Image (tube, helix red, strand yellow):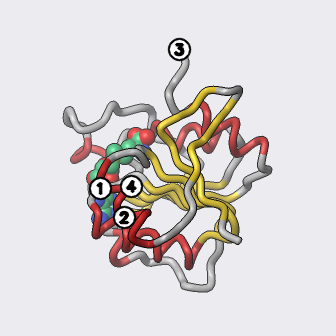
Amino acid sequence: MTHRFDVLTIFCLEHEIKTVLELGSGGFGSTNRFIRADCQVVSVDWKTPSQRNSNEVIMEEQPKNADLIIADDKFLPIGSHVKFDLVFIDTSHEKEHTKYEIDLAKQYASKWVIFDDYNFHAVKTAINEKGINVSPLIIKTTIHEIGVWEIK
Ligand SMILES: C[S@@+](CC[C@H](N)C(=O)[O-])C[C@H]1O[C@@H](n2cnc3c(N)ncnc32)[C@H](O)[C@@H]1O
């Protein structure tokens, strides 16, 4: 069955993305789509997979070849010099937290940042208040609820 995140696999293949920092592993839906594009993924979530296994997220198989970090992304144990081709933001969708994550993404992303649910009011407000240029992801003329920011 087609997953709403299959577009992430296509995006990564089309843009030759090799490394991803994912904020919000949840049920590994997005993690598995990055892995299908042969990306190396570092995925962060403050809950362990069993703590997440509620009606909060639909759990998929835990990927064996992703580095999973259990941590609040306010305290990321990743050196500030490390860069990723893509930072994917999919955690609280709260305004102030998203603004903080935009700063994190500026630090860790060499080129691309993707926001899930970028059209949520709080996420959109955070993007507007930060004054960054996020466009909808369009694959084969279909507009997705995923926003892409190319860092210049
Ligand atoms: C919408 S789910 C992620 C869905 C996931 N990308 C997927 O495809 O299954 C949001 C996740 O963000 C995590 N989260 C929320 N706030 C966080 C924070 N400050 N640091 C790390 N993880 C956080 C939650 O525990 C939850 O698992």
Where is residue 76 drawn, in percent x and y?
A: 41, 75
Q: Residue at x 55, y 52 (%)?
A: 66
Q: Amino acid at mark 3?
A: Met
Q: How many marks?
A: 4
> In this rendering, would 26 be left or right of 144?
left
Q: Percent x, y for residue 142?
A: 61, 27
The Cα atoms of the two marked residues, 1 and 3, are separated by 30 Å
The CA span between labels 2 and 1 is 6 Å
Q: Which mark is residue 126?
A: 2
**Compared to 142, does 79 lie above or below?**
below
Q: Which residue is the extreme one toward the top?
A: 1
Q: Secondary structure at mark 2?
A: helix
Q: Residues within 10 Å of mark 3 (few under 14, many from 20)?
A: few
Q: Which amino acid, by three-letter code, is at mark 4?
A: Lys
Q: Are marks 4 and 2 in contact (CB under 8 Å)?
A: yes
Q: Quadrant of residue 13?
A: top right
Q: Residue at x 64, y 36 (%)?
A: 138
Q: Earlier in the sequence, mark 4 or mark 3?
A: 3
Label 1 sits on residue: 122
Q: Earlier in the sequence, mark 3 or mark 2?
A: 3
Q: CA distance from mark 4 to mark 1?
A: 5 Å
Tell me if I can see residue 46 in this picture. Answer: no
Which residue is labeled 3 in the image? 1
Q: Amino acid at mark 1?
A: Ala
In screen coordinates, is 118 left or right of 39? left
